[in-house]
Image (tube, rainbow, N blue to C red):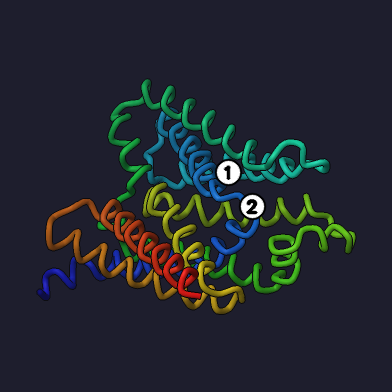
Amino acid sequence: MNGMIELLLLPFVACLILTGIHCYLGIHIVSRGVIFVDLALAQVAALGSTVALLAGYELHSTEAYLIALGFTFVGAGLFALGRVRDESVPQEAIIGIVYAVSSAIAILVLDKAPHGEEAIKDMLVGSILFVTWPQILKISVIYLAVGLLHFLLRKKFLLISMNPREAKQNGMRIRFWDFIFYVTFGFVVTSSVRVAGVLLVFSYLVVPAVCAMFFVSGVAARLLIGWGLGFVASVLGLYASAKWDLPTGASVVTVFGVILAVCAIAKYVSHNAR
């Protein structure tokens, strides 16, 4: 039992940190109706990492991180510009195109890179079981900085996410603030994917926020419920992974899927009861 606790302590701490920042950002993303922006930005970051790998850098090196971050900034610019004025082209269409093209190019690049299949698996499911204290410290600093910026600019970000029409009527430069939002979001996604992989990052971002939005409307209430569900998913997923020797990231993602199904059923039952 003690050995299991020692093995899972660092992954558990990492999961709690991911829960904290991703649940908050997830509320913005779901409210904006751009559910797959996380996958798209994560894939853009992964494309940057594959380019770095082909250039001779290690996948988890500082150089690879900086290249991935640069690619993410380009993606942030595309998504900010994707909010066209007449809305004739849905922003989700731009996000889907970016995701598909980035995935295709990443596959082409990895086909020429050594150990390409291992790199693809690492990007998808990550290696959170082997996370280290220096990695946790690094992402904690990044997330705290992003969290502080969002707290200072919370009124602007929340208004654009929750009521973009009012934001436009107030004369806000929506594309500019969208770019700032997606850049900070890109910092988080790029850092998270290196630790947890694309699938786990997407789950932490979307599932707690969606489940919370089934039942409450206030931002604070959604955060509390989302954080609680993220905690439960982390504990159960890590426990299942250790007990039955399963891939850690995939185990947590599966638990998130079960939690989402349970919340959806509970919402349906409560709605019919009323």
Label 1: which residue? 72
Amino acid under label 1? Answer: Thr
Task: Determine whether 201 is above or below 96 in the image.
Answer: below
* Residue occupying the far front of the picture: 273
Label 2: which residue? 183
Q: Is residue 193 left or right of residue 169?
A: left
Amino acid under label 2? Answer: Val
Residue 140, percent from left and from top: 46, 67
Q: Residue at x 49, y 26 (%)?
A: 105
Residue 74, percent from left and from top: 64, 40
Residue 198, percent from left and from top: 41, 47
Q: Is residue 181 left or right of residue 97?
A: right
Task: Determine whether 17 is above or below 92 in the image.
Answer: below
Q: Residue at x 69, y 40 (%)?
A: 90
Q: Secondary structure at mark 1?
A: helix
The quarter holding residue 107 reads top left
